[in-house]
Amino acid sequence: MFNFSSLLRPNIKNLTPYSSARDEFKGEASVFLDANENSLGSPLTKWYNRYPDPMQWKVKEKLAEIKGVPASQIFIGNGSDECIDVLIRAVAEPGIDNILICPPTYGMYQVSADINNVAVKKIPLTPAFQLDLPAIENGIDENTKIIFICSPNNPTGNSLIKEDVEVLLNNYFGLVVIDEAYINFSRFRSFTQELKDYPNLVVMQTLSKAWGLAALRVGMAFSSEEIITVMNKIKPPYNINQASQDLVLNALEEVGQVNDMIRELVTQRGILIAKLEALSVVSHVFPSDANFLLVRVSAAQPIYNFLLGRGIVVRDRSKVELCEGCLRITIGTEQENDELVKALQEYS
Ligand SMILES: *Cc1c(COP(=O)(O)O)cnc(C)c1O
């Protein structure tokens, strides 16, 4: 059985979190002399002199509406990267516990584990870029606290088979973290609607991709209230600054505009796939549910450098296992994609 309390590190279970001035007084008042802010104001709009809401309730209430998940089940991090770090620190005892990842995948799970001195078990995806369930089952031991999976996966672009993910959720009693950074570009539905069924499920999303807000550093984790409460205890009190909270609140009013951009990028993705497949230097374009393509080319490094010479930067993934000879290419504007295709035509 899944029991989050028994999964927690003892120091986290016993942690008394930092109590800020805003935590200790939440009522209405006209004179705030409790937080050592500058009472005179700031060089900016007056209210940036005040500490921001440590729990980001306004943002969470808006996200709750959009995502169909109660605000109490949402954690907001300084990018998804902070969510990854907080989850590892919650349950994985340095030098003792481990996490499991399925490469090729996003690099931050490994980096965050390394920083925390938490071992990483690597069970590669199958050649079809799907979960190798028997190998994962073999790989798990009693100290495996988290399985990180990424769907749609970076850098391969494909979605993982839902039934495979469900096998993990049903049979593994650590945390199953599904990174859905690219979910808005996918044909498949988010796992956020299945939180009720799986107490060990954490879904991560971000405003950095489809929402176009990478600079604001806002990522989300959706999970049970119990897990979210612990994540909130661990995070730095003011991890999302007021400028980000303000700008995100404005942006979240523009769902329609974001959906238009998603549609346009998905259209451009289809056009770019067709154009790349017609090129002699391209041997394979992998199917993508994301805003990028993994493309196998005749000579990855020389082509990468050739493109650089034209001022076009792509990502060289040719040294990554299962991605040999591949470049990862973000879907650009129509003009940018045309420029890329033209440059590749001229490579010989
Ligand atoms: C880009 C990306 C993220 C986003 O990270 P942020 O810190 O929210 O910008 C998370 N996971 C994956 C797999 C990504 O590719």
Image (cartoon, rainbow, N blue to C red):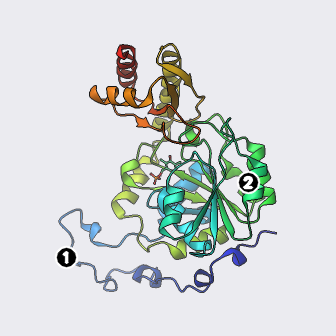
**Relative to residue 133, is residue 187 depicted above or below?**
above
Give me the residue at 71% from left, 45% from top: 131
Disc sitting over residue 136 in the figure: 2
**Relative to residue 158, is residue 90 depicted above or below?**
below
Give me the residue at 46% from left, 18% from top: 281
First in sequence: mark 2 vs mark 1 = 1
Instruction: Name the foreground residue: 274 vs 238.
Output: 274
Disc 2 residue: CB within 8 Å of ligand 1: no
Give me the residue at 65% from left, 47% from top: 124
Q: Answer with left or right where residue 196 lies relative to residue 339.
A: right
Give me the residue at 23% from left, 79% from top: 39
Instruction: Name the foreground residue: 240 vs 336.
Output: 336
Instruction: Name the foreground residue: 338 vs 300.
Output: 300
Q: Secondary structure at mark 1?
A: loop
Q: Quadrant of the N terminus?
A: bottom right
Disc 1 residue: CB within 8 Å of ligand 1: no
Q: Quadrant of residue 42?
A: bottom left
Q: What residue sits right under mark 1 in the picture? A: 40
| Res 186 visible | yes
Measured as percent of width and height from the top left, residue 63 is found at: 54, 54
Q: Answer with left or right where residue 246 lies relative to residue 310.
A: right
Q: Answer with left or right where residue 10 lies relative to residue 195.
A: left
Q: Secondary structure at mark 2?
A: helix
Measured as percent of width and height from the top left, residue 318 is found at: 48, 36
Q: Quadrant of residue 15?
A: bottom right
Q: Residues within 10 Å of mark 2 (few under 14, many from 20)?
A: many
